[in-house]
Image (cartoon, rainbow, N blue to C red):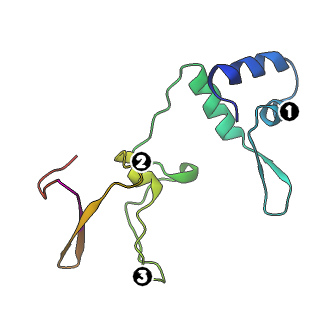
């Protein structure tokens, strides 16, 4: 998928072709379960806006697919408790970040290793 100045140059180069052809030529295509192509217009337009200097930023209340975050986690059938990428992105957490698990009465607190209970971002 093209981004930045490469994306802008490709869009300009393609000129008056249809929107679908532009999205496809810029690489914003994924494969559906059935084998067909899906054009990712939203990702394309977001990249185009960013290339033009429009910062969309990370919204604090929107997760995958633009759904509003519920701030509720449910224990899965296998016993795991999944937090989700939208929440970790809001805190700028990276793979490998470690947390100490503090268990209370019907609560779980995650404290960054080296942090304290009182630290709040």
Dot 3, how many residues are within 10 Å of its Cα: few (below 14), some (14-19), or many (20+)? Answer: few
- Quadrant of residue 105 in the image? bottom left
The circle on residue 89 is 2
- Give the dominant element type of the magenta stretch: helix, strand or loop: strand
Mark 1 or mark 2, which has the lower sequence index? 1
Confirm or deny contact between disc 2 and disc 3 (CB under 8 A). Answer: no
Name the side, left or right, on which 77 lies relative to 120. Answer: right
Q: Tell me, yes or no, whether the highlighted magenta stretch contains residue 72.
A: no
Q: Which residues are magenta?
A: 109-114
Name the side, left or right, on which 59 lies relative to 21. Answer: left
What residue is rendered at 65% in x and 19% in y?
A: 5
- Could you give the CA–CA distance between mark 2 and mark 3, rounded to whole angstroms? 23 Å
Mark 1 or mark 3, which has the lower sequence index? 1
Q: Which residue is mark 1?
A: 21
What residue is rendered at 45% in x and 60% in y?
A: 84
Give coordinates of residue 56: x percent, y percent.
50, 31
Give coordinates of residue 30: x percent, y percent.
76, 49
- Could you give the CA–CA distance between mark 1 and mark 3, rounded to whole angstroms? 45 Å
Marks 1 and 3: which is nearer the front? 3
Dot 1, how many residues are within 10 Å of its Cα: few (below 14), some (14-19), or many (20+)? Answer: few
Mark 2 or mark 3, which has the lower sequence index? 3
Near-viewer residue (94 or 76):
94
Q: Which residue is mark 3?
A: 79
Dot 1 falls on a residue whose secondary structure is helix
What residue is rendered at 23% in x and 73% in y?
A: 107
- Could you give the CA–CA distance between mark 1 and mark 2, rounded to whole angstroms? 32 Å
The circle on residue 78 is none
Dot 2, how many residues are within 10 Å of its Cα: few (below 14), some (14-19), or many (20+)? Answer: some
Confirm or deny contact between disc 1 and disc 2 (CB under 8 A). Answer: no
Dot 2 falls on a residue whose secondary structure is helix
């Amino acid at each position: 998928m093209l981004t930045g100045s490469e994306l802008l140059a490709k869009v300009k180069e393609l000129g008056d072709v249809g929107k679908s052809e532009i999205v496809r030529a810029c690489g914003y295509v994924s494969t559906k379960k059935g084998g067909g192509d899906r054009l990712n217009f939203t990702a394309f337009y977001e990249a185009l806006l960013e290339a033009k200097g429009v910062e969309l930023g990370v919204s604090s209340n929107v997760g995958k697919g633009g759904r509003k975050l519920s701030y509720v986690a449910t224990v899965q059938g296998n016993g795991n408790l999944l937090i989700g990428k939208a929440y970790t992105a809001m805190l700028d957490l990276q793979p490998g970040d470690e947390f100490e698990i503090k268990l209370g009465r019907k609560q779980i607190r995650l404290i960054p290793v080296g942090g304290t209970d009182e630290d709040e971002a």
